[in-house]
Image (cartoon, rainbow, N blue to C red):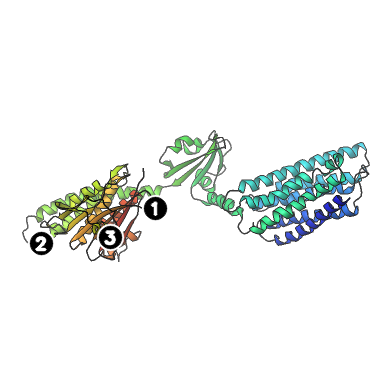
Amino acid sequence: MIVVDVAYVVTAAAGVGLTAVAVRFDRDVLGGRSFAWFLGLLGVWSAVCGVGGLTGVFPSPRATPAVPGVVFMPAVGVGTTTVPLLLFALQYTGRITRPGRRLVGLLAVMLAAFVVWAAAVWGRSGDGVGTVVLVGASVGWSVLSLAFVAVAVYALVDAVGGTVLGWTEAIAVIVPAATINTAWRVTTFVYQIGSESATALTVAVPPAATLLVTVPLLARRDPFETLPAVGRRGRQAAIRETDDIVVVVDDDDTVVEVNAAAEATLGDGIPGETAVADLLDATAAELSTTETVRLDGRAYDPQVSWLSDHHDRRLGAVVSLRDVTARESREQRLSVLNRVLRHNVRNQMDVIRAHAEALDDDHGVAIRETVDTVSKLGSDARTVARLADSETVSVRIDEVVDGVVADHCEGVTATATHDATVAESVGGDELDDGDELDARVVADGSDGTVGDGVTVTTAVPSATVTTDERALRVALDSAVANAVEHADSQVTVGCRERETADGYVVAVADDGPGLPASERAALEVDRETQLEHATGLGLWKLRWAVEALGGTVSVSTDDGTTVSVTVPDRG
């Protein structure tokens, strides 16, 4: 029959092609050899089935002489391809690097059952014992091989969705696995209920589908260029090597697994059925609301990640404990130093200043100025400490700007109608006709205040955001104070909407000589050095306040100095 001959020719040709493709994937990477063996065995047995179907060289089983031997040959392909398919899936996805004893034992049992089945098919004479052996071996290797294929497909599908393995690569491997374990498992059944043509077409499906679907998909992207195993093994290594204590519990708070750090801290050989409360003196639910856990005199920060199934039913939790003993000790030292700055140093400075005021010469003036500088450092330190107490509220930026400018100026000395050049000088929004700009003059400086005679002009339209009002006020106060200190005669404050996100940009510009490099470093580096540091906390205060806002700060010194602060809308 032409259909039969064509089907077997296609089977043989596809088998030869798959064998050639297998050579390309035979590489020394995790899962590479197994995948090559899988494709190679599929190709070899396809070629054998095709040639056998055309020539009839395979003898019929003794018990069923009317059934051609080629009908049973696809089952041989099923049995031999299952082993490399399973090894490839487990290695490729990072579940194993090499087969362990248990896996080798199971594979050996399946192959032994398969050999017994093959021998019984061609060697039995139809007696009762032969039938029992045939049925038992057939059920044994079929069930085991189906289980192995199911595990392989699950491992591949489970790995889909990451940055490495996509559905294209997964389908490319699942197609041959699925067709082999459907079409080639039912060839004898198809022969019994169908025809020889249907049997030949069934035999041709796996190699043809693999050659037409799998090979082109794999040609688009090399599946071994980056392995999914890297992600899985990386996650396992991260948990294993981290210094954090990691404890996995089930929904009854029973410990299921711990990492090496947990064993080192809590003791090796944690017995089964151990409750997490027996190890950490708290349940997972209690740990999720606890700030600090103490074990053997050390402090740990607990984090609880709840585990749920696809129905949102709780399965358990992952409890991690990070050692924060050093952090707590550092915070304690900083707290003490901050308190000393706020109280002890300030009180002593008040005493020194009181005595200095009794001196009428230049020495008294110098002492008072130095005392004021040190006192301001203490005040700035208190302001920075308060930034930790964040509270998000609805704030009008224009009102905050008015308050900050008023703190540095005597008052409004002039009110001018809108001048576009003023708003544009700081990147401000275009104002409507009739909108007014405030011009204020800094205090005369007779009491030592810097910025004598500097005019501060604001071009800030009504703008409302949800943000940390205290941090916003501190940030703008620092920027305006710096501008007043370095300006020759003019400071301008403007505001415009952000181009890429909700919120505004407030810009403070002055016409001074530019921000000194030592002061600018506070906005550009992570820490001060002995050779380059600011003269105070002013710009550090600005930077920390902007970080509390969740915004950014930038400095331009092309014409004077312009400090731009982004204020995100957190509403």
> Depth check: 557 or 285 in front?
557
Q: Is residue 32 left or right of residue 398?
A: right
Q: Amino acid at mark 2?
A: His
**SS for dot 3:** strand
Please tell me the numbered disc located at residue 260. Answer: none
Q: Is residue 211 left or right of residue 56?
A: left
What is the x, y in percent for residue 147? 72, 42
Which residue is outermost to the front? Answer: 433
- Within 10 Å of disc 1 (Cα), the crowding (few <14, some 14-19, many 20+) is few
* Residue that label 1 marks: 500
Is any atom of residue 105 visible in this view?
A: no
Say how many tags the image has.
3
Q: Earlier in the sequence, mark 3 or mark 2?
A: 2
Is any atom of residue 459 visible in this view?
A: yes
Please tell me the numbered disc located at residue 363. Answer: 2
Mark in front: 3 vs 2: 3
Tell me where residue 286 sits by quadrant. top left
Cα–Cα span, label 2 and label 1: 55 Å
> Depth check: 330 or 117 in front?
117
* Residue that label 3 marks: 562
What is the x, y in percent for residue 240? 55, 50
Q: Amino acid at mark 1?
A: Thr
Task: Check whether the beta carbons of the residues at disc 1 and disc 3 lie within 8 A of each other.
Answer: no
Q: Earlier in the sequence, mark 1 or mark 3?
A: 1
